[in-house]
Amino acid sequence: MKFYAKILIFAVLLIILGCAGPAIFINKEADWTFYQKIGVLPFVNLSQDRYAGEKVQSAFVTEMYLAKKFEVVEPGEFNAKVGEALKSSGAQISEDLSADLIKSIGEKAGVQGIIAGTVREYTTVRIGQTDYPLISLSIRLIDVPTGTVVWMTSHTKKGGPNLPIISIGETHTLGELTQKISHSIISQFMAKAY
């Protein structure tokens, strides 16, 4: 009996250790009270789903509204200001934005910080007999006056059961997983920054 208990404890420890969390960078010297108003850039989409950027951005903005720590500029209004800044500079949205472009967008939109996101994967994967969603994101908060990154995270999450073999708490759809990963990222940011 003790042998089986030891195997069970070992298996549980392996499962816990195998669940690596997201990679998170927080600038310890940032004054988080400075970021009263934030804008969210359209997410860069590197996945095969052509609308993944819009889907994830929408869920992410919703979670930011629910956090109630800062004012989030309405996405349509912010996108119009981004469009103006891009047009005047001849640039386009990409993973690498210059500090000057960030400053220009921030000044036009009246924000102190800008969230830039990249959807790396947005798909379903086959596990056994079932397909489960898989999402991989990189998100960063950029300080408008300096153009420096003050917070950044990379997060990959797969749907499926929370515990192997036991089908409790399964996530079957990309929409549900998108909401969960957005909530997780914002919650972790709030816990570390505030």
Image: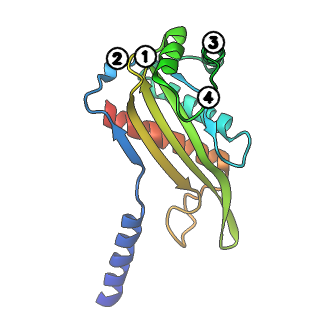
* Residue type marked 2: Phe
Q: Is residue 93 left or right of residue 10?
A: right
Circles 4 and 1, Cβ within 8 Å, touching? The answer is no
- Sequence order check, earlier mark of 2 and 4: 2
Amino acid tagged 3: Ser
- As helix, strand or loop, the secondary structure at mark 2 comes to helix
Q: Secondary structure at mark 1?
A: loop
Query: Position of 34 compared to 118: left or right?
Result: left
Residue corresponding to mark 3: 88
Q: Would residue 139 be found to the left or right of residue 20 on screen?
A: right
The residue depicted at 68 percent of the width and 57 percent of the height is: 124
Q: Quadrant of the C terminus?
A: top left
Q: Quadrant of residue 91?
A: top right
Dot 3 or dot 1: first in sequence order is: 3
Of mark 2 and mark 1, the one earlier in the sequence is: 2
What residue is disc 1 on? 112
Q: Which residue is mark 2?
A: 34
Q: Nearer the viewer, residue 70 or 102?
A: 102
Separation (CA) of disc 4 from disc 1: 19 Å
- Considering the numbered disc 4 on the image, is that residue within a helix, a strand or a loop? loop
Left or right side of 178 for 31? left
- Viewer-proximal residue, 132 or 109? 109
